[in-house]
Image: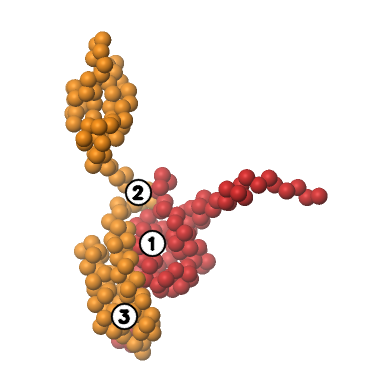
Chain colours: A orange, B red
Amino acid sequence: MTAPPGSLCCRTVELAVRVLPADHRQRYGLEFIAELYGMPKAQQRRHAARVLTSAWALRTALSEPVSGANGDRTMIVKTAKPLTCRLNLHHRWRWLSTEDGDRFERCEKCGKDRSEKVGGSPEAGQGISGISSF
Amino acid sequence: MADGGPRMTIPTQLVLRALLEDPVQELYGVEIGAAAGLPSGTVHPILARLEGLRWLESRWEDIDPRAEGRPARRYYRLTAAGVESARAALARAYRPSPVARMRPATEPT
């Protein structure tokens, strides 16, 4: 018979589990409580405290995309634009070509397009057809 | 993480090395922490990440909680693919220090 964990440790674990995604709470709640059994009281308190402090890291780990059958991770597409792009202060322009040979520039960071003006410098904001400019 | 593996931080390497000591043996979180030399309660984020990659599998201990006087524990072990991936990742993660790399190989006299 192993000593059950104290109420303070149980409450600490409950608090830790609360930050986890809802579908993982029960599993980890049971897992953490089960781990407290058989430990001396002082170790139980330390263990519960560490579970609490690593709860956000666990949440992050659980929120990462689930891998495919062969272990490859789903690609995360970052949709937030960098601040310098949002403020139109700095873009990282790269020359690209359309299928019909027109040249245009696109910011590598935010995807904004600017087309090549005949006899002039590229003008920002004039996207090519079919590609929305931001 | 271009190869789809986890970030090979030092704690991740320690956990993988601990699990690779005996890949067929199942361990629960506290035992893994102790084997890896990490504080108990800190290994679960690593375990969750490895489980997400399917390098690890876990199951509830098959016991009668009343008879044992405690709830069932969650046991982890490396999958067959996880053993291979972990070994390869640890081999890649090992890098001699820059000083050691720059030092010319000594020839036997």
Callouts 3 and 2 close, C-beta under 8 Å: no
Q: What residue is drawn where x is 22% and y is 23%? A: A124
- Residue occupied by mark 2: A73
Q: Residue furthest front?
A: A89
Q: CA distance from mark 3 to mark 1?
A: 23 Å
Q: Tell me the number on the disc at residue B71.
A: 3
| Quadrant, the N terminus of chain A | bottom left
Residue drawn at x 33%, y 26% is: A94
Name which of mark 3 and mark 1 comes first in the sequence.
1
Which subunit holds the residue at mark 1?
A: B
Q: Are marks 3 and 1 on the same chain?
A: yes
Measured Cα–Cα span from mark 3 to mark 2: 34 Å
Residue A16, horizontal then vertical, whole percent: 26, 69
Direction from residue A11 to residue B47 in the image, left or right: right
x then y, percent, for residue A73: 35, 48
Q: Residue B46 got which mark?
A: 1
Question: Which quadrant does the C terminus of chain A fall into?
Answer: top left
